[in-house]
Every structure is written in structure tokens, then in C-alpha cells.
Image (cartoon, rainbow, N blue to C red):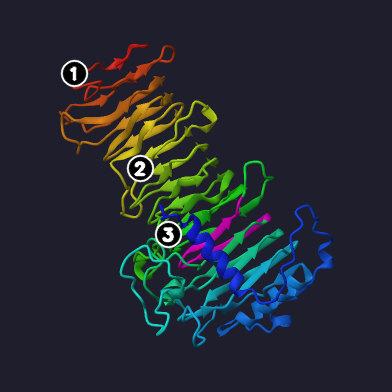
Amino acid sequence: MRVTLVSLRTRFLSAVALLFVWAIGSAALGAQTPPGDADSYPRIDLKRDCGAQGDGKTNDTAAFQQAAERIQKAGGGTLIIPKGVYVVGRQTHEPGKTPYYRREPIFYVKGVKYLVIEGNGALIRIAPGLRFGSFHKDTGERYDPPAMPFTDYNYAVAVGSIIHVDESRNIEIRDLELDGNLAELIIGGQFGDTGRQLSACGLQLYNNVDVRLHRIHSHHHALDGVMIGWHGLKESDPPTPHELVDCVFEYNGRQGLSWVGGRGLKAIRCKFNHTQRGLNGGQPFGSAPGAGVDIEAEESICRDGYFEDCEFVNNGGCGMVADSGDGGYSKFVRCTFWGSTNWSAWSAKPGLVYEDCVFHGSAVHAVGSPKPELATRWIRCTFEDKPWEGKGPYGNFLAELNGNLENVLFEACTFTANSRRTIWCSGHGAIFRDCTFTHKATTINPGDYQCLIRGATLSGCHFKEQFPPETKAQWFIITDGTRVLEGKPTTVDGPHVRWGGPNGPIGQIPADKDQ
């Protein structure tokens, strides 16, 4: 959670954008205007037409600014970035003006109707020595606020986003690497509620329609690999499609992806990994929540998210978190969530569905609803406590749920607990259908519970055990208020783990009976 960075983050990024847009036009975007013929827009070669060097040493910020200005004036265009290493980002000091270090934009356009950036495998890297965080407004020295939150923008020094596009449509950015160069930044004091909530993203995309990001590698940014948002979006508004394909967002300071508004975000074969682990040697650095993906509508809504064959692995925060704002409403298919030092997934908003996904590290929270389509659902998912390269997995259970669980569904899911308990499900209304629970943990105190399922209904479930032959200890399953339905039998193998209590039954559990 962020102390209403709803307003703080959005206000800051909006203010920064306005502050640094220098007379490159602000043509209003006609919501229904077609893009026209792509050939009617200029094709700009960053080296040939704008003088970029791409040699890994020369600062090429001016070339990107020139390209953005030409595209802005034309209402759209294609930017060709020849393969190379482009160093970008500048901060200057103007006496009497605050903050002490004022950043320049790199590539910023607004209100264009057509934009293609052809990366050709190029690398764009933030220049070493840029400052990020709080710095004294009069001296430029690092400033550590006496208390948090701290939101005096006279002290706020941002790096900025490498590519920043607002209020535009028909955007495609492909085959590009964006390096935030986190280890070479000069870090100031904290700003915001926790950490340093200031602009420093690979891509920042607001109020855009029909966006395609293909084969983008955005890493080691002080804030996010990519931020996608839409100010003031309502349920009745039309879709705002964004597509991410074969992208990697890793080692960023706050999120791989911050989705803070939109209707229709699709990610295919993308990786959202290693957030807050971007300093040398994997040292932690970053700001909350530190997730692979944060679904957090800010004065907006998040709807119709779809993630297929994606990874959410080894993040400092949750693999995926949906906890704040009018969001959730996303489907995950064949995705891997691996929480090594934090939760694998945090599902505290409605409309979240997981199909054929794998969870290592505790998956926490669920939302119940009288409408089944709004309740959290796990279908054919696998939960197992496997460590990530010697770390974790996180948590004492494979899944932990509390509260209102009406229509929360686990269907054909497999829980395998090697050294932990399988599940803590304490609430009312959860449904377990055709699920298998395998208990292996001998480290749990004898006479204690291996599994807790309260207030649920079960059908066709199987509680297995795989202990060493010499095991003599006894455990049990807590089943207060849980009912077994008629039809497919629910069975408990035993003899070491019993149903309902230390002396409870094993074998087939009688149906339609309150426990």
C-alpha cells in the first residue's frame, strides 16, 4: 500500500510532464480520428537525421529530444533507432530555481495519432551520475527528511522516463532494451510515503489507445520497468487496448509493471521478475510495493487484464498484487508465481481468475462475492513450496485465505507441501472441487494440524500423505464448519493425518455432514 499515491504519484508525474514540455505542441487527440496512411508521417533515423552517436559514451539526449519534436509537430511518425548503445538523461541546475537538479525530458510526445519506434536491438541507457531522491533545494546535497511521508517537491529530483507518451493512439515500440543504470545513480533521501516515489521508468504511457510493446527489455530502473495508466477512466468508457508480447521487466526498483488505469491490457510471454534486487550483488533497493505487477487503479479503473505464459518470480514484494483502487478483473493463464521472500500473489480485489498457473510461495487473500464471476478462482493450479535458488519459498502455507470467501473456487488444484502446511482457509463459502492435498512435512509438531479448511464445501477432494516409513507422529485437518457434498467422494488416506481432529476418521468422509 502507498499513502494515497493515487494523488501523489499521479500529480507528480503529470506536473513533471507539463513542466518539461517545451513548445512542441499540445494538439488535442480526437478520440475517433483514424491514424491515416503511415506513409504520410515522417520516418526519422536517430543517427542520420538527429545526429545520435550510439557509441555508449556520447550523451544522445538531444537527438531523442529532436526526434520527439519532429514527430510531435507532424502528429505522428516512425523513429528508427539503429543498433547501438545510446546514453541519455540530463539534469541541470538553474540558480534560484527548485528542485536544485532539474531533469530534461528524453523522448516525450503527446497527442500523436501514430507512433512506431523500431529499436533494432538497440540499448538506451540512463547516464551515470544522475540524481534520484530528495536533495536540498538550496545546496544540492542529499536531503534526508525528518519524517515520512515527505512530499515537498522543491526537494524532489527525478531521473524521468526514457520513453514517455501521453494521450496518443496507434503506438508500437519494438526490439529495444531500456537500462535504468540503477547502480550508477546518485541516490538521495526518501520521497513520497516510502522509498523514493519519483519518475524513473523505462516507459511511461498514459491515456493512450492501441499500444503494442513487442520484445522490450526494461530493467534496472529506479522506479518501474513500465507504467501504464489512464486518468479518470470509467466503467462506461470504451476499451483502451495495450498489448505486451515477449517483454522482460526485471531488476526494477518499484515494479516491473505498474498498471494504474485502463481497460484491456494483455501480456503474452512476459517476465516481471526480480523487483528491488537491482543493485550489485542483488542488494535490495526500491519503493513499495515492490511487485512484479501492481494492479492499482489511481482515480481510474483497471479492467480486462489478461496474462498468458508470464512469470512473476523472485520479487522483493509480491509477484502480483491487486489491493488498492478500483481494479482486479484480470485473468492469468499458465503463469508462474514464485515468491522467494514475499507472497507469490496477493489477490484482494474482485474478478481475479487463475487457470493452469503454478505458485511457489504463499498465495494470499481472496475476494468472495454472491456473483461467482467476481469471486477469486483458481482452476487446475499447482501449489508447491519449492525454493528459488536457495531462497524461500515464502510463508507458512501454500495458500492463506480469510474473511468472506463466498464462491471462492479451487477446482482441480494440486497442493504439495514439502516442509509447510498446505492451506489456511478460514472464512465462509469457499468451494474445493476435485482438489488433491499432499502432506509431506514432518517438521510440524506432532499432534498439530497440517491443513485448515473452515466454512467451506468439498467435493471429490483427496488428502494424501507421503512421510518416511519410520514416521510415527499423528496430525490432523481442521474442518470447523466444513461440509462434504454428495457425489464424488472426498477421502483422507491416513494413518498419520486425520480428518477433523487427532482421532478423526480416515478413508471416505461421510457426505453432507457439518464438521
The structure residue drawn at horizontal position 42% and vertical position 66%, both measured from the top left corner, is: 151
Location of residue 82 (image quadrant): bottom right
Amino acid identity at mark 2: Ser
Q: Which amino acid lies under the numbered mark 1 shown in the image of this protein?
A: Asn
Residue stretch in magenta:
209-232
Q: Secondary structure at mark 1?
A: loop
What residue is drawn where x is 43% and y is 15%?
A: 488
Please tell me how crowded label 3 is: few (under 14), some (14-19), or many (20+) other residues with Cα within 10 Å: many
- Residue at label 1? 503
| Residue placed most toward the observer, 290 or 474 | 290
Q: Mark 3 or mark 1: name the one nearer the start of the chain.
A: 3
Q: Position of residue 486 (x, y in %)?
A: 42, 11
- In the picture of the structure, the residue carrying the numbered disc 3 is 275
Pair 1/2: label in front: 2
Q: Separation of disc 1 and disc 2 at Cα?
A: 29 Å
Measured Cα–Cα span from mark 3 to mark 1: 46 Å
Up/down of 235 relative to 27, above or below: above
Q: Earlier in the sequence, mark 2 or mark 3?
A: 3
Which of the labelled discs sits on residue 362, or is there none?
Answer: 2
Q: Residue furthest front?
A: 96
